[in-house]
Amino acid sequence: MTTTPAAQAAPLTAGADPATTPSARTLGPRRRPGRRGLATMGQRTFTGALALLFLFPMVWAAVASVSPKGGTNQTDGIGLGNYRTLVDYQAGIWQYLANSAFVSLLTVVLTLTVSLLGGYAFARFDFPGKNLLFLGTLAILMVPYATLLIPLYVLLNDLGLQNSLVGLALVLTMFQLPFATFMMRISFEAVPKELEEAAMVDGCGTFRALVMVLLPAVRAGLVTVGLFAFLAAWNDFITPLILISDSSKVPLPLAVANLRGQTQGIVDFGATEAGVVVLALPCVLIFLMLQRHYVRGFMSGALKG
């Protein structure tokens, strides 16, 4: 007669504690979530609700851009009629996207180049008036940039850069430099000087040590500065409104604003929502790709020590 595995198990002896048996030790009692678990659950619930709150306008704009509405190019069923209106408007959406991309990328390149050198100089070199000059640079942040546009318009006109995408990029770069220089200074100060000194002992000069050693170390700060510069240049409205008069050179935000009242002052909400989606999509994608470096760049100053 064969015995089953259950029958082969040793029976409990008199007075044995069931909690000390192998099965009881394996399973163990059910644990209730502690204070830390409840706090984590509450934090995740709050951040999830906050994310939905911020995503709601974007989802609403995306749905409205393909939904039927009277007075738009999409009056029957769900479709891309509003996007066709955007594509066919004056010079076409591709021209306006190219204008925005050119201005944004040029602004990013100029901002990164100048702020990299400026932040390195403020972090590593001592010269008379350094702190005063740095405070003066940061003080530009307190000046409403709209008040500077008219003098800049006159200056660009004298330089032959008025109504020019290059001139627009230069103005947007100037507005980004105070914050960018501040970010790059704290990024360089978070890097130990011993790395740079070791590179110089190995024969590197100042510029080569900056490029080969320090540049990879401040990559997170560069990404943060570049992302801020791109978002500011891509979404800027008032600066091209003042500086650009040629309708074929305006960036996409200004083209979408002009599109709203193209037919006897009647607002085409469908085409406007389509323009909002096209404007927001590159910003969302770039931020999602670079968000890890973005957060690390803001934390770089806190790691100095």
Image (cartoon, rainbow, N blue to C red):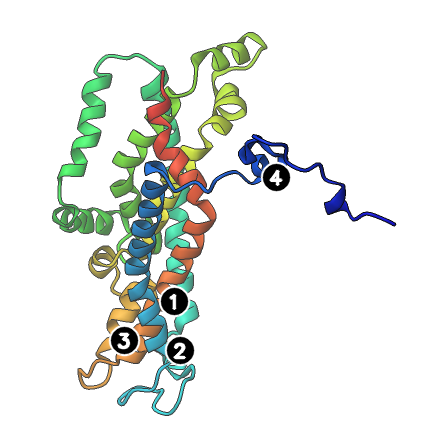
Whether label 1 touches label 3, CB < 8 Å: no
What secondary structure is marked by label 4? Answer: helix
Disc nearer the start of the sequence (1/3): 3
Q: Which residue is mark 3?
A: 259
Q: Which residue is mark 1?
A: 278
Q: Is residue 128 above or below residue 283?
A: above
Disc nearer the start of the sequence (2/4): 4
Disc nearer the start of the sequence (2/3): 2
Say which residue appears at 40% left-offset and 71% top-offset.
93
Q: Which residue is mark 2?
A: 83
Q: Position of residue 71 (x, y in %)?
A: 26, 89
**Amino acid type of the residue tagged 3 in the rendering:** Leu
Q: Which residue is mark 4?
A: 23
Task: Identify which residue, 24 or 33, lies in the foreground.
Answer: 24
Q: Examine the rendering and report whether any part of residue 114 can be seen.
A: no
Disc number placed over residue 124 in the picture, else none: none
Say which residue appears at 36% left-offset and 87% top-offset.
74
Gap between marks 1 and 2 measured at Cα: 9 Å
Q: Mark 2 or 3, which is nearer the eye?
A: 2
